[in-house]
Image (spheres, rainbow, N blue to C red):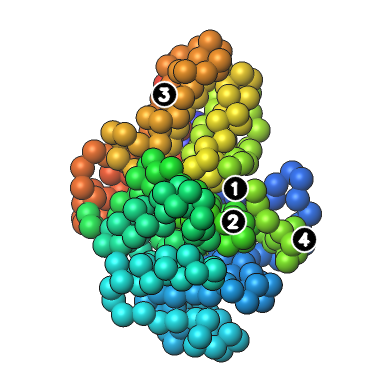
């Protein structure tokens, strides 16, 4: 291990926790993007996407707790009430089941609601409306009733919010036929996937991350375009490599990129796949990468049992990629415990750069 890396890992735990926001991609630009020299936060990207789609289609409207007069709990809807008025930006009572049901019904009648949950932990109150009404009615009605709706809000662990406000619901919603599920990492993901979700004729769950809202990323001419839409069901190669594939989504993409930088200093080339889409899953992108690297590691903040890593591992085992693996698939996940409130225990319950770095070397059998 290099002296610089030893110095990093010898920092007090509290110091590492205080700087847990991934920075590997903050100053990086995709190889096929046109940098403008400006930056944009994930919050701003989401706001732009919603505003542009509301301008484009008058049937698009937003509802949720504090989305209007307060400009959103995380300021994602800032300025939308002033621009579009109270008929299209609607504050709701604190009743997730109620306003989610209202939104699903409005979608059945031809509008395109964007239903914001202050956190997807609260959406458990509305999960019957999302799954049994939103996801299944198109099939159960013989394709008569369409449900073009977006359910969006922060998902996964934040900071200091303990067990009931820290869950990752990607695998929960990813199981459901009739739903599409995406989880953006950076500003490009946020804007492109949100616009695609709003335009899609199916119910789409957009799993954001609270700690990423204020993170800035380089702006590009692609992001600035009102026509920019990221395709649902397609992963993005965040970093190319030849020795090991790291497949992840949402905030851990940043940790994976940081780990890849550390590995590169030791001559190890890691390919990082930003999955972006949970359902449909871009299995082809993972298979293609495995055929090049011959190793796969999945990273998620959710629980280990029945999670995204488990599903990816099973699908890889059942595919032609299995014959290309030189080692078993490695799953890096959150700890199998309710999220602790104590800061030091919370940090130990979630995978970070150090964990990914060490596990990648273990997969490659490098000390």
Q: CA distance from mark 4 to mark 3?
A: 39 Å
Q: Which mark, by number, is residue 200?
A: 2
Q: Which residue is mark 3?
A: 314
Residue 230 at x, y percent in the picture: 65, 52
Q: Which numbered disc, 4 or 2, marks the residue that appears first in the sequence?
A: 2
Along the line of sight, the residue nearer the viewer: 173 or 2: 173
- Tell me if 196 is positioned left or right of 259 in this view: right
- Tell me if 154 is positioned left or right of 83 in this view: left
Residue 72 at x, y percent in the picture: 44, 77
Q: CA distance from mark 4 to mark 1?
A: 20 Å
Q: Which numbered disc, 1 or 3, marks the residue that appears first in the sequence?
A: 1
Residue 260 at x, y percent in the picture: 55, 35
Q: CA distance from mark 4 to mark 2?
A: 23 Å
Q: Which numbered disc, 4 or 3, marks the residue that appears first in the sequence?
A: 4
Where is residue 133, by image quadrant?
A: bottom left
Q: CA distance from mark 2 to mark 1?
A: 9 Å
Q: Which residue is mark 1?
A: 232
Front of the two marks 2 and 1? 2
């Amino acid at each position: 291990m290099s002296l610089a890396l030893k110095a990093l890992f010898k920092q007090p735990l509290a110091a590492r926790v205080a700087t847990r926001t991934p920075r590997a991609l903050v100053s990086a630009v995709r190889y096929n993007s046109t940098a403008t020299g400006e930056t944009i936060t994930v919050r701003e990207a989401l706001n732009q996407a919603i505003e542009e789609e509301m301008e484009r289609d008058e049937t698009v409207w937003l509802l949720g707790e504090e989305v209007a007069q307060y400009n959103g709990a995380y300021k994602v809807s800032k300025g939308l009430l002033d621009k579009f008025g109270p008929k299209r930006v609607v504050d709701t009572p604190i009743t997730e089941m109620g306003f989610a049901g209202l939104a699903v019904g409005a979608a059945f009648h031809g509008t395109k609601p964007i239903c914001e949950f202050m956190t997807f932990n609260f959406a458990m109150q509305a999960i019957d409306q999302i799954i049994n009404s939103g996801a299944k009615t198109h099939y159960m009605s013989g394709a008569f009733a369409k449900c073009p709706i977006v359910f969006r809000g922060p998902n996964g662990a934040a900071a200091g919010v303990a067990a009931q406000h820290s869950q990752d619901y990607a695998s929960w919603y990813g199981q459901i036929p009739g739903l599409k599920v995406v989880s953006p990492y950076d500003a490009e993901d946020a804007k492109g996937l949100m616009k695609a979700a709003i335009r899609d004729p199916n119910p789409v769950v957009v799993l954001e991350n609270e700690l990423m809202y204020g993170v800035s990323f380089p702006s590009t001419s692609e992001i600035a375009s009102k026509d920019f839409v990221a395709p649902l069901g397609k992963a993005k190669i965040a970093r190319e490599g030849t020795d090991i594939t790291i497949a992840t989504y949402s905030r851990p993409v940043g940790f994976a990129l940081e780990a890849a930088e550390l590995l590169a200093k030791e001559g190890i080339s890691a390919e990082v796949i930003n999955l972006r889409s949970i359902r449909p899953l871009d299995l082809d992108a993972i298979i293609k990468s495995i055929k090049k690297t011959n190793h796969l590691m999945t990273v998620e903040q959710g629980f280990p049992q029945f999670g995204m890593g488990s599903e990816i591992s099973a699908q890889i085992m059942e595919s032609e990629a299995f014959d290309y693996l030189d080692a078993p698939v490695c799953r890096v996940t959150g700890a199998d415990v309710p999220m602790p409130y104590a800061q030091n225990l919370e940090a130990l319950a979630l995978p970070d750069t150090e964990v990914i770095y060490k596990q990648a070397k273990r997969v490659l059998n490098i000390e």
